[in-house]
Image: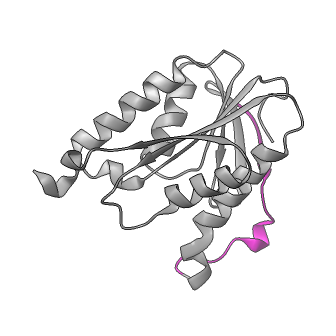
Amino acid sequence: MVAQPVARQVLLITGSRALCDSPAAESWAREILYETIRVLPPDAVVVAGDAGGPDHWGLHEAEIRDLYWTRFQLDGTRHDWRGLRKLRCVEWCSIDAVPERGSPRWRRWPLERNRVMVAQIAAVRAPIERSALALLAPWASTHGTAHTAMLLDQRGIVVRRETCPVGHAPFSH
């Protein structure tokens, strides 16, 4: 599942895209991501989806620190990297299973991708520390981050939940 089998730590990042809605919310999220990722050991693996916002920001932090990182994309592929070097690309599902954009199944597809991310991290047999960072936006209209955190809880993976102050919401200014 992970880009480097001897990693001692895997960190899954999940976060609300609504954190992109205001400069204050983005700054809040980026600071937490920076502080979390900068203390990871050099053999850690950072895992996220391919949504804009926290997924992208977290993987970028891993990239610039030359860490291993894995991105699960909605097109059914998983990309494993070390810093700027792509290590491999594999399917996390059959390409035929990917629903057509705009179809009723597509709307729930990110939740399926998140379920697979969590399952693959939980399935790693190596003695590693598994954890997650969930960045929540109380004003978000969707709740994929909370859903992913619940899946992580069910698998016994420790989730650090951080909720953005409502004062950072775009409508509070």
Side of 23 relative to 32 (left or right):
left
Looking at the image, which is closer to me, 104 or 12? 12
Query: Who's the residue at 55% across and 18% down the image?
Result: 65
Q: Is residue 91 magenta?
A: yes
Q: Position of residue 130 (x, y in %)?
A: 71, 35
- Vertical relation: 103 (above or below) 13: below
Q: Position of residue 52 (x, y in %)?
A: 44, 50
Query: Who's the residue at 59% across and 64% down the image?
Result: 110
Side of 52 relative to 22 (left or right):
right
Looking at the image, which is closer to me, 118 or 79? 118
What's the coloring here? one colour
Query: Who's the residue at 58% across and 52% down the image?
Result: 149
User: Residue 127 appears in which quarter of the rendering?
Assistant: top right
Query: Who's the residue at 78% across and 24% down the image?
Result: 7
- Vertical relation: 47 (above or below) 137: above
Side of 2 relative to 47 (left or right):
right
Q: Position of residue 81 (x, y in %)?
A: 69, 32
* Number of callouts: 0
Q: Position of residue 146 (x, y in %)?
A: 51, 57
- Vertical relation: 59 (above or below) 74: above
**Which quadrant of the rendered structure holds the N terminus?**
top right
Q: Is residue 16 magenta?
A: no
Residues drawn in magenta: 86-102
**Residue situated furthest bottom in the rendering:** 104
Looking at the image, which is closer to me, 120 or 68? 120
**Residue situated furthest left in the rendering:** 173
